[in-house]
Amino acid sequence: MNLLEFWQAVPHSAFAQHALWMSLLAGVACGVVGTYVVVRRISYIASAIAHSVLAGLGAARYLQVVHGWSYCTPLLGAVTAAILSALIIGWAASRTEEREDTIIGAVWSVGMAVGLLFIYSTPGYNENLMSYLFGNILLVSKTDLWITLGLDGVVLVTAGLCYNQLQAICFDEEFARLRNVPVRTYYNVLLLLTAITVVLLSMVVGLVMVIALITLPAAIAGRFAGSLAQMMAGAAVLCVAFNLAGLTLSYTPDLPAGAVIILLSGGAYFLILAGSAVHAAVLKQRNSG
């Protein structure tokens, strides 16, 4: 089996070229946003936003087909649903006494349920809506690349301008309040940044793959990084590495690239966990001896 077939196809195949560029561009956004998500421990929020996107996709398709609203594109529906979900979670978490995980679970389940109801209420089953769950990185277009490049710009500018504030609310929210940092405002900024990243990338590579790329590389990088900036850089590099390795391994046997990328990311994460557990056990044994 020729594992270099993907790289041999890159000079001649637009699909392979687009997949290569998407692997690089997605790594930037996922590395930066994923670091904030993992450090702030809001991975469930990213997952809830990702799944609530289905409500926007279903509503947009329903309005297009049933009411003829041609301007209601899937992208518009997905972005609207993601932003609304982020704002609802942010508002409920700061203004009510309800536990955050309960709010996240409600947004997650309601978003999925609303999306499914719209899909089944639309004449003619639309397989494209379900494909957003899994996506296909080998089918990205030039438009997708430009959108992702724009996303990277927004993520990097926001992270640069709000670096200290976002770092403060991620590591020590009480200390940030004592320093008069508007915690609620920057928390909402983080939620919106997460929502935009999740929805735009999910439209390209699928919801499941986005959740994996946002959380797993950052979680691995966090075990070795000495600072937030190092964690971001490490997560971005790992995300790109997993993407390229997945494309390389899946191309020749014609396997779903997204599934292979997720398995590589998950396998690396659990391997690191196992290594850490063994290391901790050896140190404990040495100390006790």
Image (cartoon, rainbow, N blue to C red):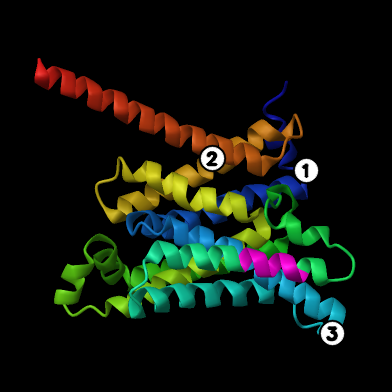
Whole-percent x, y for residue 202 in the image: 62, 59
Q: In this picture, which residue range is highlighted in magenta?
A: 111-118
Q: Is residue 248 visible?
A: yes
N-term mark: 3 or 2 = 3
Q: Which mark is residue 12?
A: 1
The N terminus lies in quadrant: top right
Instruction: Describe the element under mark 2 as helix, strand or loop.
Output: helix
Q: Mark 3 — residue?
A: 67
Q: Mark 2 — residue?
A: 242
Whole-percent x, y for residue 226 in the image: 24, 47
Residue 205's quadrant in the figure?
bottom right
Residue 276's quadrant in the figure?
top left
N-term mark: 2 or 1 = 1
Instruction: Describe the element under mark 3 as helix, strand or loop.
Output: helix
The C terminus lies in quadrant: top left
Q: Nearer the viewer, mark 2 or mark 1?
A: 2
Task: Examine the structure image and report whether residue 70 is included in the region drawn in magenta.
Answer: no
Q: Residue at x 83, y 62 (%)?
A: 126
Q: Is residue 180 above or below residue 106?
A: below
Q: Is residue 237 visible?
A: no
Q: Residues within 10 Å of mark 1 (few under 14, many from 20)?
A: few
Instruction: Describe the element under mark 1 as helix, strand or loop.
Output: loop
The residue nearer to you, when weighing 39 against 123, is 123
Q: Residues within 10 Å of mark 2 (few under 14, many from 20)?
A: many
